[in-house]
Amino acid sequence: MDAMELGVFFYLSTLSYLLNSILFVPVNYFLQSEFSKNEKININETKKILIYAFIFSVPIFLLISTPLIIFNKINILASVEIYIMACILFITSGLRDLLNNKGHNKINGFALLIEVILKIIIFYIICHFYSINAIGLIFSAIIAISIEMLALLWISKKIFTIEYRIAKNIDLSYLKSVFHLSIASISNLLQLQGYRIIYPLAGFQATSGVYGAVGNMGTSIMASFSSIYSQIELPKIYSTNGKYIINYIINSIVLIFIVIIFCIVLKDEIVLILGSNSYLSYSNLIFYGILTEGMNLVLGAGIVAMTIMGRTKNLSSYSVIAATISLLAGILISIYYPEKIFLIGLPIVLSQFLLIILLVINGKFKI
C-alpha cells in the first residue's frame, strides 16, 4: 500500500481514538464504577446511560468534525467512519474492562491479543493482495474490532447475571470525578499518536505512514508479550496494595530488553513478513514501537499502584505536560526536519520516559 494512504489511515484512526477519549471515556469509567458496586448488571439503567451517551456524543462529534470538513482536512464519509469506529471502540473497551474488573482477566488479555492479531492479518491481506485507500482501510479496522466486540458480547451474556429493573434517575455529577482520568486518557493519546495528526495536516502523509507502519510492528510485538505479562503480574500489585510495583517495573524492563534483542536479530525478517521491501531501510523504527509500548506497560501498572495508594492527584497534570512536550517537539520537527523520519519517535519516547519519572516520584514507590 502507498505510504501516503497509510499516513491518511493513521490520521483517521487517531482522530477516531481521540473522539472515543473525548466522548466516551468518562462514560465508561462511570459504568465500570457502577458495575463494581453490584453483582448483577442492571440492564435497564445501563441501556439508559448508553442512549444518553450516544445522543450527547452526536453534537459534540459534529462540533469537532465540521471545521475539519470545511477546511478539507477530512471528507464526510471518513468522518462517519471515524465516529462509528469510536462508538465500537467504546463498547469493546467497556466489555473488556467489565470482564477484567469482574475477575475474568484472562479473557480480557486474550481479547486484546485477538484484536492485535486480527488487525495484523487484515492489514497484511489488504496491503499485499488488494489496492485500497485509507477509507477502505478504516473500514477493515472497523470489521476487526466489530468481530472482537461481538465475541465479547456473546461471552458476557454467558458469564454475567443480568437484572431487569426500572432505571433510576442518572446523576451526571460523576463527570467531575472522572474528569482528570479523561484528561489523562486524551493527553496520553495525543502524546503517543499526535504525529499522526500533525504530519498529515502539514502535508507529509507519507512520512507519517512509513513511521506508523513500521513502528506499529514493534508496538504489536511488544503488546503481545505485554498482554501475557500483565495478566500474570498485575494481580500481584493488587494483592500487595501496590507494594509490588518496583518488582513489576524491574521485570518489565527485563522483558523490554528481551523483545529488543529478539527484534535486533529478526527486524528485517519482521518487516518483510508484516510489510514489504519498501520499508526495509526503515526497520530500526520497530524499536520506537517497542519502547513506546513497553513504557506503556510500566505506566499502566504505575497508575494502578497510584490509584490503590490514593496518589492520583497529579496524574492528569503530568499527562498534560508529557503530551504538550511531545506535541510541541513533533510540530517543530515537522516544520524544520519533515524529511527526518527517524526523529518522529524521539519526543514520543522521551516524553514517555519523563512521565514514568514523574509517576515514580509522585507515587513514592519504594523497593
Image (cartoon, helix red, strand yellow):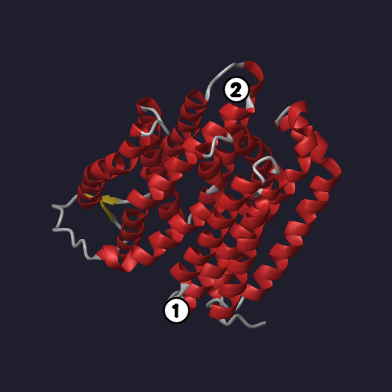
Q: Quadrant of residue 207?
A: top right
Q: Which mark is residue 126?
A: 2
Location of residue 97 with respect to 154 vertically, above or below: below
Location of residue 354 with respect to 67 vertically, above or below: below
Could you tell me which secondary element the residue under label 1 belongs to? loop
| Residue at x 37%, y 34% (from the top left corner) | 71
Circle 1 is placed at which residue position?
A: 310
82 or 126, nearer to the observer: 82
| Residue at x 24%, y 42% (from the top left corner) | 59
User: Residue 286: percent from the left, percent from the top?
Assistant: 72, 45
| Residue at x 35%, y 32% (from the top left corner) | 69
Quarter of the image for the N terminus: give it. top right
User: Residue 203: percent from the left, percent from the top?
Assistant: 55, 35
306 or 190, nearer to the observer: 190
Decide which of tag 2 and tag 1 comes sooner along the chain: 2
Q: Amino acid at mark 1?
A: Gly
